[in-house]
Amino acid sequence: MKKKKPSTRKPVRSLKDILRNYLLRHAQTLISSLGRLWLKPIASLLTIAVIAITLALPGAMLILLDNLKQAQINWDGATSISLFLKQTVTEQQARKLAGEIHSWPEIEQVRIITKQQALEEFQQYPGLGNLIQQLNKNPLPTVLVLQPGDLDRYLSQSLLQRLQQRPEVDLAQLDLEWVKRLSAILAIFERIILIIGSLLGLAVLLVTGNIIRLEIQSRHEEIEITQLIGATNAFIRRPFLYTGLWYGLLGALLAWIMIGISFWLLSTPVQALTELYHSAFQLSGMSLSWGLALLGLGTLLGLIGAWIAVAQHLHRIQPR
């Protein structure tokens, strides 16, 4: 009776086992690449700090721009309207008009600047006091400064036309010019941030790529040995990509901390400034969504920089 030969066929692995082994190798490489950073703490910390500063600058500028836009939205509807009354309008008539306008639901506050108050304020400017004294009478009109409620720009324009039709009013002026200037400045600031952010993002790619290039050169012999025993390019490439990932992620995390500390230090003086203008504006730091976006961007830049470096330098290493 013939003996059965033992089967030489390899056991068929299930898709679940293949996936488990694949994820296990990636997890091992991820942890080991972090361990390599820990073995050279000073050099790693310096690289992470450079990436953090590079990411923190445009990140802080974006958060500041977001705060300014929010302040613009709050101030846009809080612009004042100045009513320059005719010279024939007496102070008593001006106060009566102010009381009538103050009763309107659109108006929150009315402030009267009489002719005498305007003259005293005008005389405080250097060189203008003597000019006023040479005139026979006070040429300055009575002014009503109106503070509308929560109105948008279009409703404010409609209110302005209504006030201009009053017979006592010589000129009604809506103080929107500074809002338009602020909008133009913010548009320029946003474009500058975009340019600076792009340049600094490129700098992160260059820093990460250079570090990975040095890492490849320092592990030249190790790479040759792994190639000789049949390691694939994906296997050799993997630890360098994860090293770039760690640099980008840790740099972004440190940048998040830097931005948070910076805005915390600025919050008190900014609050003191806004209180002088009787404003409820509060400086907002980096939100969770902004922080996660920063972490994602830093990680992506680290990976791309590492990939570029590996693609350029790894193929040059051939086993002897």
Image: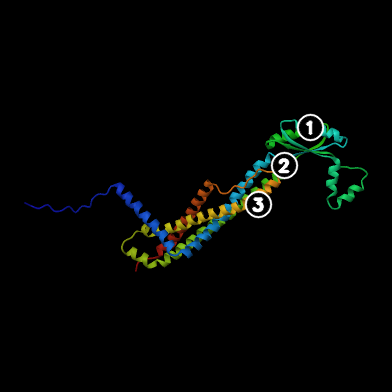
How busy is the neighbourhood of tag 2: few (under 14 within 10 Å), some, or many (20 plus)?
Answer: some
Q: Which of 277 and 254 is in front in this view?
A: 277
Measuring 68% from the left and 42% from the top, which residue is drawn there?
A: 75
Amino acid under label 2? Leu
Q: Residue at x 59, y 50 (%)?
A: 62
Expressed as whole percent of the image width and height from the top left, the position of residue 259 reads 56, 53
Residue at position x 84%, y 43% in the image: 117
Query: Upstream in the sequence, badge 1 or badge 2?
Result: 1
Q: Which of marks 2 and 3 is in front?
A: 3
Point 73% across, 44% down: residue: 177
Q: Residue 138 appears at what percent x and percent y?
A: 89, 42
Q: How crowded is mark 1: few (under 14 residues within 10 Å), some or many (20 or more)?
A: few
Q: Earlier in the sequence, mark 2 or mark 3?
A: 2
- Indicate the position of residue 45 as horizontal and vertical percent values: 49, 62
Image quadrant where residue 32 sits: bottom left
> Of 299 and 259, which appears nearest the observer?
259
- The residue wearing badge 1 is 99
Looking at the rendered structure, the kind of residue marked 3 is: Pro
Q: What element carries label 2?
A: loop
Identify the residue position indicated by label 3 in the image.
Answer: 269
- Residue 206: horizontal and vertical position, in percent? 51, 60
The amino acid type found where label 1 is placed reads Gly
The answer to whether 267 is drawn above or below residue 150 in the figure is: below
Q: Nearer the viewer, residue 270 or 164?
A: 270
Q: Distance between the residues labelled 1 and 2?
A: 24 Å
Question: In screen coordinates, is 222 left or right of 177?
Answer: left
Q: Is mark 3 on a helix, strand or loop?
A: helix
Which circle's residue, 3 or 1, is located before the other in the chain?
A: 1
The residue wearing badge 2 is 176
Q: Is mark 1 on a helix, strand or loop?
A: helix
